[in-house]
Image: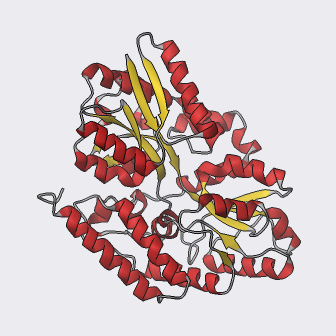
Amino acid sequence: MTVSFWHIFGGELGQTLGDMAAEFSRQNDGITIEAVNNGGYRQNLNQSLQASRAGDPPGIVQIFEVGTRLALDSGSFTPVEEILPEDEIDFDDFLPSVLNYYRMDGTLNSMPFNSSNTIMLYNKTAFEAAGLDPESPPRSLAEVRQAAQTIVDQTDMESGISWPNHTWMQVEQQFAKQDQVLVNQENGRNGRPDQTFFNSEAGRSVYSWWKGMAQDGLYLNPGIEAWGEARQAFLTGKVPMLWDSTSNIVSMQSGAKENGFELGSGYLPTPDGANTGVVIGGGSLWVPDALSDEKKRAAGEFIGYVTQTEQQARWHRNSGYFPVRQSSIDRLTDDGWFENNPNFSTAFDQLQDTEDTPATRGAVMGVFPKTRSINEEISVSIINDQLGVEEGLSRMDTQVSEALAGYNGNYDGSQ
């Protein structure tokens, strides 16, 4: 029996998943897990839904966090908790903040696998050259601006900071840090949301700062969702600071070494240094409902395998995504991993400092991918001074609320 596993990773991460699939297959007679790189998150979700409607779904699908409501509403998936091997899963060992993101109405619909949050990476060598303390990264946005200006003035760096124009960073994480929900209905977890809060104090404070940084040449704009361009600007010495996903620490550490500077990391800065917490990013594993019971059981066995303590520790070491189990963190700690790789501990410290609130649990809505596109496009107009901050944020609220109304109109009731 062959069970296909559609995922989004190429390169070394794709190879790691392929190795996990092959090892599981060797250990389980009669089951072959076929790991397939199926493009990016949006493509993987859309094609899996199309395949399910056609009656020929994959066995396991990796779906990004903001696809949760769309996946649920499709009716195409079986709650993962119903098909996991009970004797292998100790949910008390899983990080509550991770499970809480994917649990709706008390049901765990998908299994968190590649989880991440946003941290700030910085060039310690550049900080020291500019007379700044290389062991004390900025914690507030005002401190980021001050450090950026100092380094630009004291070195030949082009700008102060970069990050991809991505809603996950400038809105989702910043709102969670300030305990501001993105949508009503308890951030979409107590019913279908019909109102957004881009034009809130949390939004205005972040965007006023961001626009000022851009206008004064202290923010290097790599483009919409331009992860690679932002990372290159940092690694090649154009900027001393970068907001990035914790999943990229492995490659950034090697890149910093190759480019001759010491890498540092810190919590994601906020307007006033607030730290209610971060929201989970990354993806989870879903099992299509149209599978035979036999294939569902096989899929559940593999999901149980890749979330075992040792496998999650291995996945973290190879990727930078944090393990979803406390026992994996304990094992890494006992092995001296964090002591020898202190930048990896930043993500865990930030996560463990996170309070459990509707804001940090993350928003749930059926138009989340579209919401990101709306936010990112209007953000360009704001930071380029084509729109005022409040005008732009109000436009986001209007457009996303209209999209929510259209989506919600397809469903009866509030759930």
Name the residue at the front extreme.
54
Quarter the C terminus occupies = bottom left
Q: Residue at x 82, y 83 (%)?
A: 153
Residue 74 point in image, percent of width and height: 24, 47
Quarter the N terminus occupies = top left
Q: Is residue 108 visible?
A: no
Residue 339 position (above or below residue 351):
above
Between 82 and 383, the one nearer to me in the picture: 383
- Image quadrant assignment for residue 81: top left
Q: Residue at x 60, y 70 (%)?
A: 269
Between 224 and 159, the one nearer to me in the picture: 224
Residue 19 point in image, percent of width and height: 58, 26
Between 101 and 53, the one nearer to me in the picture: 53
Q: Is residue 157 visible?
A: yes
Q: Residue at x 48, y 33 (%)?
A: 36
Q: Is 369 placed left or right of 128 in the picture?
A: left
Residue 179 position (above or below residue 264):
below
Residue 168 position (above or below residue 326):
below
- Image quadrant assignment for residue 414: bottom left
Residue 330 point in image, percent of width and height: 60, 36
Name the residue at the top extreme.
29
Q: Is 106 placed left or right of 271 in the picture?
A: left
Count of residue discs: 0
Residue 150 point in image, percent of width and height: 79, 80
